[in-house]
Image (spheres, helix red, strand yellow):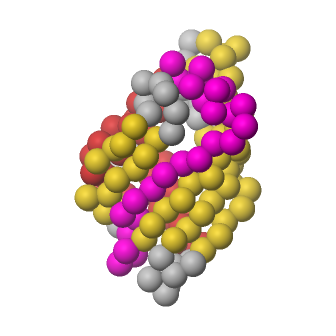
Amino acid sequence: MANLTSETVTAAYAALASGDKKRCQQYWADDMVWLVPGHNQLSGLKHGLDEFLAFMQRVGQLSGNSFRMDPIALLITDDYSADVTHNVGHRAGDESRVLDINVVHLLRWRDGKVVEGRAAIFGDGTAQYDRFWS
């Protein structure tokens, strides 16, 4: 996919943040897969856009819609992008339960859409991530 740009990646995440399935379908394939790291209620493979959007909706519910991913860096090749984000939020109903980690998302693109994604968390961020979502 020689036309992958930072603007495309940014637009894909903006579509995802909107929660609008039609908008998401512009950038996220209906048959996509996403691997959520860790050992908590959200972890595991998400098969298809519907399951991925349900996962994202659950993230919003559990965090009282406080969860956000602040971009740090973006790398792009022909059919892959890797973005580094600072992920923060607090649990719904408990603002003392905080998430504050750096994450890398590796996305594989085909025909202008994400077909596969995975997240990687480093160091004690993995334990923090599991505690936050458990």
The answer to whether 22 is drawn above or below residue 128 in the figure is below
Quadrant into which the N terminus falls = bottom left
Left or right position of 95 against 51:
right
Q: Is residue 125 highlighted in magenta? A: yes
Asked whether residue 59 is in view, the answer is: yes
Q: Is residue 44 highlighted in magenta? A: no
Q: Quadrant of residue 28?
A: bottom left
The answer to whether 125 is drawn above or below residue 2 in the figure is above
> In the rendered structure, which segment of residues is drawn in magenta?
110-134
The residue positioned farthest toward the bottom in the image shown = 2
Residue 61 lies, in percent from the top left, at: 45, 26
Asked whether residue 27 is in view, the answer is: no
Report how many numbered discs are placed on residues in the image. Answer: 0
Residue drawn at x 69%, y 42% as measured from the top left: 122
Residue 121 lies, in percent from the top left, at: 63, 42
Residue 26 lies, in percent from the top left, at: 35, 67
Residue drawn at x 66%, y 66% as measured from the top left: 74
Left or right position of 61 against 51:
right
Residue drawn at x 72%, y 37% as measured from the top left: 123
Residue drawn at x 60%, y 20% as measured from the top left: 131
The answer to whether 23 is drawn above or below residue 8 in the figure is above
Residue 88 lies, in percent from the top left, at: 67, 35
Q: Quadrant of residue 25?
A: bottom left
Say which of 72 and 23 sits in front.
72
